[in-house]
Image (spheres, coloured by chain):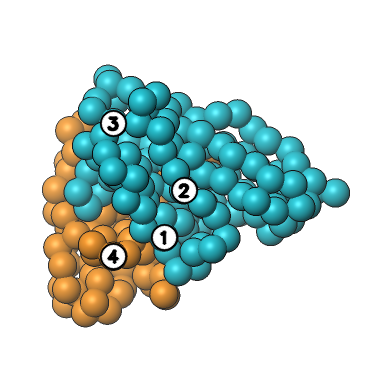
Chain colours: A orange, B cyan
């Protein structure tokens, strides 16, 4: 059961936009609109920031957005801020399996 | 307010058994799956399994099937993760999280398990 594939690191300057990709297969990311994204700051529990590909939970800033094309989902952070520096994980859900990506470290330059 | 409160950090020796807990409050505990997620030091998140406290239906990741046991006591709104014989490689942070259909929407604070001789 392979993990989803994410870039190890992405960086950007304050105010810029960055995009993190999450590649799976037609059996997970591509087959269902059940992709979630989690933000994790050092020493903290993960926090849900995107669910069902494009939806934001209440309280999550609208600079976070999600999309999907084929077997690849993406998280875009627009107007990057210092507090966005964290690890980000994608996840796919099916009725029999949950997968996480390997994680992407976002650095704000 | 939905809360998941996990038991405290543990230090164990190889071969010992361990059971850690996750107590839910602020919602109907029996109506949502609870998942367990491992995070080894400096590494990413790994799904271990989920349990539906309403009927104790359990699903395991193939990577963890037979290595751990997930259980729940709905009378006290608590889910458990247990090992019968710990290994050094079980050293990790373990999180419980509520599964709201396809997403883990609330997370516990984590339980650090250290296994060392």
Residue A89 seen in the figure:
no
**Residue A100 percent across, percent down from the top left:** 38, 61
Secondary structure under tag 4 reads loop
Q: Disc 4 marks which residue?
A: A96
Q: Specify the label residue B29 is tagged with.
A: 3
In three-dimensional space, the C-alpha distance between marks 2 and 4, rounded to whole angstroms, equals 16 Å
Secondary-structure class at tag 2 = strand
Q: Calculate the distance from the C-alpha at mark 1 to the C-alpha at mark 3.
A: 20 Å
Q: Nearer the viewer, residue B32 or A41?
A: B32
Q: Residue under mark 3: which chain is it in?
A: B
Determine which quarter of the picture holds residue A69.
bottom left
Q: Which mark is residue B70?
A: 2
Q: Are marks 4 and 3 in contact (CB under 8 Å)?
A: no
- The residue carrying mark 1 is B60
**B51 w.r.t. B20: above or below:** below
Query: Where residue A23 appears, x then y in whole percent?
Result: 31, 73
Task: Identify the residue shown where x is 17% and y is 43%.
Answer: A56
- Local crowd size for mark 1, using a 10 Å CA cut-off: few (<14), some (14–19), many (≥20): many
Q: Name the element at disc 1.
A: strand
Q: Chain of mark 1?
A: B
Q: Residues within 10 Å of mark 3 (few under 14, many from 20)?
A: many
| Label 4 chain ID | A
Dots 2, 3 in contact, CB < 8 A: no
Q: Nearer the viewer, residue B111 or A69?
A: B111
């Amino acid at each position: 059961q392979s993990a989803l594939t994410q870039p190890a690191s992405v960086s950007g300057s304050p105010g810029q936009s960055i995009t993190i990709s999450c590649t799976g297969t037609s059996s997970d990311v591509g087959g269902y609109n059940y992709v979630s994204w989690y933000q994790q700051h050092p020493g903290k529990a993960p926090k849900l920031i995107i669910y069902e590909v494009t939806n934001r939970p209440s309280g999550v800033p609208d600079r976070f957005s999600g999309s999907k094309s084929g077997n690849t989902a993406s998280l875009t952070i627009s107007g990057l801020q210092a507090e966005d520096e964290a690890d980000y994980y994608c996840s796919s859900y099916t009725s029999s399996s949950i997968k996480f990506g390997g994680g992407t470290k976002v650095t704000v330059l | 307010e939905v809360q998941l409160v996990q038991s405290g950090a543990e230090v164990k020796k190889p071969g010992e058994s361990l059971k850690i807990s996750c107590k839910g409050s602020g919602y109907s505990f029996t109506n949502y799956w609870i998942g367990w997620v491992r995070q080894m030091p400096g590494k990413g998140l790994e799904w271990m399994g989920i349990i539906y406290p309403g009927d104790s239906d359990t699903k395991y990741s193939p990577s963890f099937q037979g290595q751990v046991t997930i259980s729940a006591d709905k009378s006290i709104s608590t889910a458990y993760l247990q090992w019968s014989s710990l290994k050094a490689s079980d050293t990790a942070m373990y999180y419980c999280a509520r599964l709201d259909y396809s997403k883990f929407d609330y997370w516990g604070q984590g339980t650090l398990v250290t296994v060392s001789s």
